[in-house]
Amino acid sequence: MSKRRQVRFGLIGCGLMGREFASAIGRWCHLVQTDVEPVITAVCDPNPSATEWFVDRVPSVKSVTTDYKQLLADPEIDAIYCAVPHSLHAQLYCDIIAAGKHLLGEKPFGIDQAANKLINEAIAKNPNVLVRCSSELPFFPGAFQISKWIREGKFGKIIEVEAGFWHSSDLDPNKTINWKRMIAVNGEYGCMGDLGMHPLHVPLRAGWRPKNVRALLSNVMTHRPGADGKLVPCETWDNATLACEVDTGSQQFPMIVSTKRIAPGHANSWFINIYGTEFSARFTTQQPKQLSSMPYTSGGPQAWHTVDIAHVSAYPVITGGIFEFGFSDSILQMWAAFCDEVVNGREGMKQPFYCATPQEAAQTHAIFTAALKSQAEQSTVVIDYSNVP
């Protein structure tokens, strides 16, 4: 195999997901057919302890700063991974794009629709910059196989789709409040903005863009302890269930999308269930090796088939097919897709499933904005996609 081309990265925001990226790079040797390799050369965070983690563990890091603009001015940096609170997305993402750096940014690509519009305007002015949104869970083998079945048109007429991302990290009422419960930092979308790209990535990629939404939003924990232990208001939505209608022009069907921070018993569960007249399929990360499907022919039996799916990922790895695929593996696969597209372009990628796009992120903003209106009016709201590029 020819020598891999390096993509030199700067990290802005050195928290949990930045460390996951560094860990993925450390496991890059697991990938057996890639012609690209990421290298972290610079890190930026206002918290010294966050950057110290990288200095101590990532030998390639040459520059440490609290000023992100130093990274943007560095000609030795090709791309940026930016993981900062939602209120900072518009300013930082626009500056990164204007500096000509490729960007993988965290969802939701802006605290609200106005911020998202600014980011898309920056992208339009810099067409040579690749911009993608972080969304790793559809790279699980079961989800990857379902995406393949969608591309093949295997389902026939779609009857219904259910997609969700649930976890129970906020079930404890004594958990100290964090920025995700503050409108000024997280935005009014609440759990939708923070989690919503995960369940919507595959449906939107399939072209299943909902035309309307009836939202059921809930703020389960209205108060939490602050840093001093005194109770303070929780301002954002804990859980969201969105009942949507999809009209592709050739078929219509209902789609239920749910995001939950308080889902008892769910550590980090992503799922998609697709029911069709000729084929149905369902997958959840709760059972990462199991994929269920039901082929159906007229007059035939209706029987679900569940198999232990092999470790078959978008990008082949050294791991044997009998072993389990996990969250860190999905992050490795997502980063492989981003770096592959940076180096080879969409048409030259080694496999067809690319990272979530800014257009898909803009569609989620249209959906979430309509969902807020639906909740306020207690009605079904038509989704306005006029701001989607």
Image (cartoon, rainbow, N blue to C red):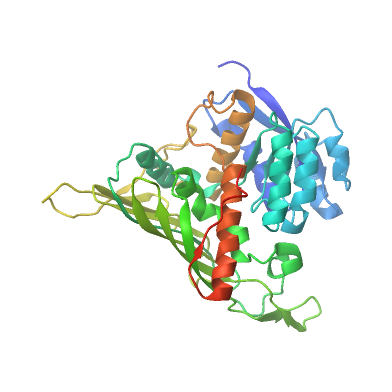
Residue 158 in the image: state x and y as whole percent: 32, 51
Q: Residue at x 63, y 49 (%)?
A: 387
Residue 76 in the image: state x and y as whole percent: 82, 28
Residue 257 in the image: state x and y as whole percent: 47, 61
Image side of residue 181 versus residue 218, left or right: right
Query: Quarter holding the C terminus?
Result: top right
Image side of residue 184 versus residue 200, left or right: right
> From where the camera sits, is residue 110 visible?
no
Query: Quarter holding the N terminus?
Result: top right
Q: Nearer the viewer, residue 53 or 339?
A: 339
Q: Residue at x 76, y 66 (%)?
A: 184
Q: Nearer the viewer, residue 4 or 105?
A: 105
Residue 7 in the image: state x and y as whole percent: 70, 28
Q: Which residue is drawn at 71% across and 55% down?
A: 114
Q: Residue furthest left?
A: 299
Quadrant in which residue 245 is drawn = bottom left
Q: Which of 8 and 20 is in front in this view?
A: 8
Quadrant in which residue 192 is drawn = bottom right
> From where the camera sits, is residue 35 visible?
yes
Vertical position of residue 26 compared to residue 2: above or below:
below
Vertical position of residue 333 compared to residue 305: above or below:
above
Q: Residue at x 10, y 51 (%)?
A: 299
